[in-house]
Amino acid sequence: MGFDLSFPDMFRALSFVAVSAVLVCGWSLWPVETTTATAAATAPTPSPPTQILPLGEVRPGMKGYGLTVFAGTKPERFEVSVVGVLRRFLPNQDIILIRSDDARLLHSGIVAGMSGSPIYLEGKLAGALAYGWSFSKDPLAGVTPIESMRRELTRPLRGPQATPSSEAALDHDRGPTIADVADARQKALPLFGRLPLPPRLLEGAEPHLQRVSVPLSLAGFSAGSAAEIGRALEPYHLVAASAGGVGRPDSGPTRFEDGGPIAVQLIRGDMSMAGTGTVSQVVGDKVLAFGHPMFNVGEIYLPIATAEIHTFMSALSTSMKLSSPMREIGSLIQDRQPAILGDLTRRADMIPIEVTVAGPSRPEQTFRAEVARHRFLTSVLAGNVVSSSVQSMSSDLSDATMTLRSTIRLKGFAPIVLTDSVFAPDGISARVLASSSGLRALSELAFNPFTPVRIEGVSIRVDVDYRPDFAEVIGVAVAGEELEPGSRPSVYVTLRPFNGREYTETVAIEVPRSLAGQTVKIVAGAGTLSRPELAMPENLAGLVENLKKGWTARELVIGIETADEGVTVRGAVLADLPGSVIDTLRPASSSRRADVYRRVLRVVTPSKPVLIGSKDLTIHVREETR
């Protein structure tokens, strides 16, 4: 509907960009339903017992090897030697420092995607490769001790429907949340538009030990969307790379193995987004990987899959594995400082999203994908899917008019249908799409304070026309210097279309007798600039109803702002109350959630062009003669 919901600050604090921890497994974005894997093909195969090398027995000069996949799906060995042990490198966690003289790593250094590669010293499992140096000439790495990682095996789970909010952090310091990153990105967009940000290749180029980056394999995304994803997730050591494919979900290994690749899936279908690392140890029906967190958000449920490594790509700052996800065989359940942990008996539910794009230059096309079901992630991921779908079909940097119809299927409610009409002088950008009412509604539902909700699917249709089909509101007038109480005067709204002659819309409005003797303001403008009276919702049903209220930019809204007052109480808007009742219900009284507002009398009329802007005039209503 192209409008902003305006709730009190207490409620707004729960919205998408104001909650701390952008990637926390929420007090339930929606109930994340996981299922038990029963197919024989994905049943875990018992691993042979592995001897553990205690950290206290690790000594400088010890020799060993690691396992990782250089190409394909089968792990290969690379030789290592111990340099030393860094005590308390992280809170309550030591790091084993190793060096590798493997010829394949001498050129590339430690590679993004090697996170989790098991390291064996004297035939025993010592830990997982997890840390490295950017801009380093030598293949030095930090290893998370396996003892720290295995502690996660016994951590109790709260369950998908009872996982509360928690704070996300970067390494051992408190860092920006994903909400912070997304908010900053949105604030930067109006400044940079669709132009790429300046290169930051040498920013912070001094070598320092940090988490080995997780390559975020992207496929099916436009260049603009991929760049936005990369900027948003860079603080989390996720390196976005449009160098993989959507994968082959019905092929590949049917089980994880130590040293093999593991992919955490965020989007799959016609588009794919998956973070790839290495399995450290399979323990029964559990799998430990990465040796460090992905987002460091604690308990979280996302699909995990096997993956195919295409090759290594060497780079000055960060070399990486190029990969594609394959067969889903479990669910992520923990994302902690020493490791991520997956459960092979679970399946993480995802939300289907369908985007249909139609325009004048190409036949209609529909894109289908599934996005992670997660309070903080879903709106961001859905926005990326929509943005990439539209830009791949309609990327012209030209005057564009768009009609976007969003349908959200919410369990227990009729479909929520929201419409936006937008004129964009620089084409359909990610900024324009991100502000659509459908994507904003996903966030409002996610952070509602009433009850967990389940999104069963999202369908979005985008109709794009490359012509400047808009008109600006440049004036508003009435006949005479005063209004007669009880009359229906005409309001004359002057519109100026692009490259056309000005014209006037005439709309009759009613002046109530109760306004006699008052000075009022008449406001005429695009529907998106007029806010409906909304009561603070008392339950989820009230929130859903509020989401449906508002007007689009293809509606001309004329309102009379009066000195009269109405009241919102217990989720209802009460407009016509005696003054004595309003005084009783003022916030100083004992009534719960009674808020007084200034009434606006409105007339809404459809408009063919997209409207922009608004104008107002102040006028007096004549005293009523007796």
Image: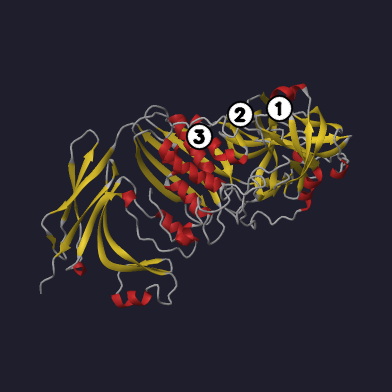
Q: Position of residue 402 (x, y in %)?
A: 37, 38
Determine which of the numbered discs, if any, sits on residue 298 in the image. Answer: none
What whole-number distance in Å separates the C-alpha atoms at marks 1 and 3? 29 Å
User: Which-is-in-front pick, marks 2 and 3?
Assistant: 3
Q: Residue at x 22, y 59 (%)?
A: 521
Categorize mark 1 by other alpha carbons within 10 Å: few (<14), some (14-19), many (20+): many
Q: Camera-side residue: 446 or 214?
A: 214
Residue 1 is left or right of residue 561, and the answer is right
Report the residue marked by disc 1.
109
The local secondary structure at tag 2 comes to loop
**Mark earlier in primary sequence (2, 1):** 1
Q: Residue at x 34, y 49 (%)?
A: 528
Residue 172 is left or right of residue 287, and the answer is left
Determine which of the numbered discs, if any, sits on residue 225 in the image. Answer: 3
Q: Is residue 327 visible?
A: no
The image quadrant where one finds the C terminus is: bottom left
Amino acid type of the residue tagged 3 in the rendering: Ser
